[in-house]
Amino acid sequence: MKVTIKDIAAVAGVSHSTVSRALNDSPQISKQTKDKIKDIARTMDFEFNAGARSLSGRKTGNIAVVYKASYDQFGSSLYISQLFIELRHFLERMDMDAILLEAYHPETGASNISRLLNQQKIDGFLIVHDNITRKDYDSIKRSCLPVVQLHLPPMYCHKEELDYFFTDHFLGGYLATEHLIKKGCRRILTVLSNDSDSDEYELRTAGYRQALEEQGIRFEEKLIIPVDCTYLKGYYLFNTIPELIANVDGIFFQTDIQAFGFLTAARERGIRIPEDLKVVGYDDAPICESTIPQLTTIHQPRRKLAELACDRIIDLINKRNNESRIQEILFPTLVIREST
Amino acid sequence: MKVTIKDIAAVAGVSHSTVSRALNDSPQISKQTKDKIKDIARTMDFEFNAGARSLSGRKTGNIAVVYKASYDQFGSSLYISQLFIELRHFLERMDMDAILLEAYHPETGASNISRLLNQQKIDGFLIVHDNITRKDYDSIKRSCLPVVQLHLPPMYCHKEELDYFFTDHFLGGYLATEHLIKKGCRRILTVLSNDSDSDEYELRTAGYRQALEEQGIRFEEKLIIPVDCTYLKGYYLFNTIPELIANVDGIFFQTDIQAFGFLTAARERGIRIPEDLKVVGYDDAPICESTIPQLTTIHQPRRKLAELACDRIIDLINKRNNESRIQEILFPTLVIREST
DNA sequence: TACATTGATGCACACGTGTGCACTAACCTT
DNA sequence: AAGGTTAGTGCACACGTGTGCATCAATGTA
């Protein structure tokens, strides 16, 4: 049988109320009693019953991590997996468990968000890389459960109402392009992914454009190339747009995997990188250290992002500093390797 | 405020007991009453309060999915991510949520398993790709919570005591090697990963050996090459063991990513694949369709594995067919592409 | 008509924890 | 010494759901 506070109360010779207060560090209990009770609890391997606790005190110790599952080559499933490792790391310190799920049932479309709300299974939401409907957004607001977003909030809601953290994609695009220019590039192509419903690629492209114009380089619409986010599309870029590649001296790939494919193809064609052509990627995936040459890229501060989001959601759950919203945009950094 | 069965009872003009029984399909309640109550529940968006339910009925609706996080290039984090998508898919149908965590706290080493047990937060364990200590194994047994393993059980426990499903790595090794032999290979190298504490690579190698010996080909210890599980190690295999590669006509890579690196290097050296040398990988990662040439590999039935494990754990939770253990070994299949 | 049987429902308590309020004992003040 | 204050603790109820047992109405039987 499981140990309950009543068992501890019996051993300590006090009532279960005193045990409850002692273990929750209530100021009403004397230090002496607290120490004694905590000792007993430790030796008996006591843990609070999660169900009972949530029933009376409204704390479940669970956080819903909402994400969008995908089955792509390396891209978002790897990114999510890595970000989740970081999130778990910080949640663990606060003795929080993560329920990982998609916002909507892939078949029925039923909302997991409203189900969790009604079941009162969780203390808050961390929303990673998925947009939720207006209706669910309103449900969460009505429930007063805290939400922290790890991306730009959806269009329909006032940004002032939400806590969110994300990385500055505009700056990332700017840094990548600026670096290429500093290295001497004068005609720069950018390749981006076409299979995303978010606007991160638009922002990166805007940063690319800004860097060009600041340096007095003409921005050309035709140098923006959207293709699938795969190794092979990067590899076959020489076949798709040969005349463009022949006339540029730098390429800013907005995903590492596309850059990876391109680097391989370039090597096979005897194009020297970085001497003939300079290449920058985006994301700083683990593969960047394995490409030949190693890939210069934009690093997104995954760990910092996870830490801020976790700290914030914990604060909100504990009603600390919750009178106003926090929105923070983290700076990506340039990681210079051999391809530039 | 949340809707409770008392609210429904008030609307329906019955007691909360009747509502509870009706929604749980108790035979004591008339069909007429049931239908009426279920209708009301639906219109009121009712969901059971998870905490209260677990407190009284011992069902939480949560499953712990225990895995070992890793930060590698494509390997296990991608595999876990994909397997988890499948697991979620089947759990979702049963309205189960997944709490995803590691067995032990990476810093303190504290056991999440015993914590969850004591907190009574979950109904069962799905253990993916991680070994748990004898002590925790005993704790789980004492708690009578069901466990299903998605890999070989640890050495210390009697296999008859556990439910588990995994894929036949011996057969995978056999199929890969047999295929190479059928395609005319007579001297076959195998490359495996050295960064795993499980014995899947040993099994694959044993299958490799069996296939060789069945066809009267001499097994040579020196043709077994353990290297890191990275793209680059595959790529530089020509540098590491040039004399061996020069004298073989087939290579069985026990991870796709190593094979991927090798294929790239081979193309650069003008070695024709499959004409000069045939190559097989393992796992059927998404990248296999992007390699040049596309990679023949061994497919592990991820979806089937997830389906069986989920069905089984649900059965065990509901005390169906739980008088004996189920152990099933799934067959991997050969996926023939261009590299053989 | 009286009684037995069956089917449907409600009452009351249990599960483990949190908390407002009342109570006690000890100490302080005048 | 009487009254007031304070610190520490226990009582009793609440949270939402499940369930054994009692109850009640309806129906069947003799």
Image (cartoon, coloured by chain):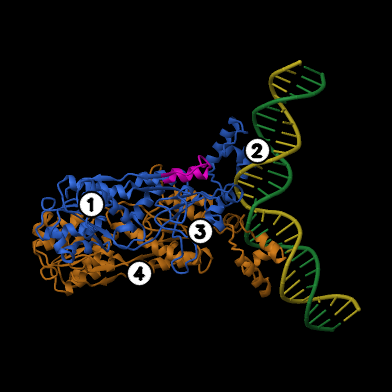
Chain colours: A blue, B orange, C yellow, D green
Could you tell me residue B147's position as x and y percent?
46, 60
How far apart are labels 3 and 4 at the CA level?
41 Å
Q: Which residue is mark 4?
A: B330
Same-subunit check for callouts 4 and 2: no
- Using a 10 Å C-alpha cutoff, classify the residue at mark 1 as few (fewer than 14 neighbours), some (14 to 19) or many (20 or more): many
- Using a 10 Å C-alpha cutoff, classify the residue at mark 2 as few (fewer than 14 neighbours), some (14 to 19) or many (20 or more): some
Foreground residue, B218 or A75?
A: A75
Identify the secondary structure beneath mark 4: strand
Q: Chain of mark 3?
A: A
Q: Chain of mark 2?
A: A
Does residue A279 appear left or right of residue C28 in this picture? Answer: left
For badge 2, the amino acid type reads: Val
Q: As displayed, is residue B79 above or below residue B39?
A: above
For badge 4, the amino acid type reads: Leu
Q: Which residue is mark 3?
A: A136
How far apart are labels 1 and 2 at the CA level?
61 Å
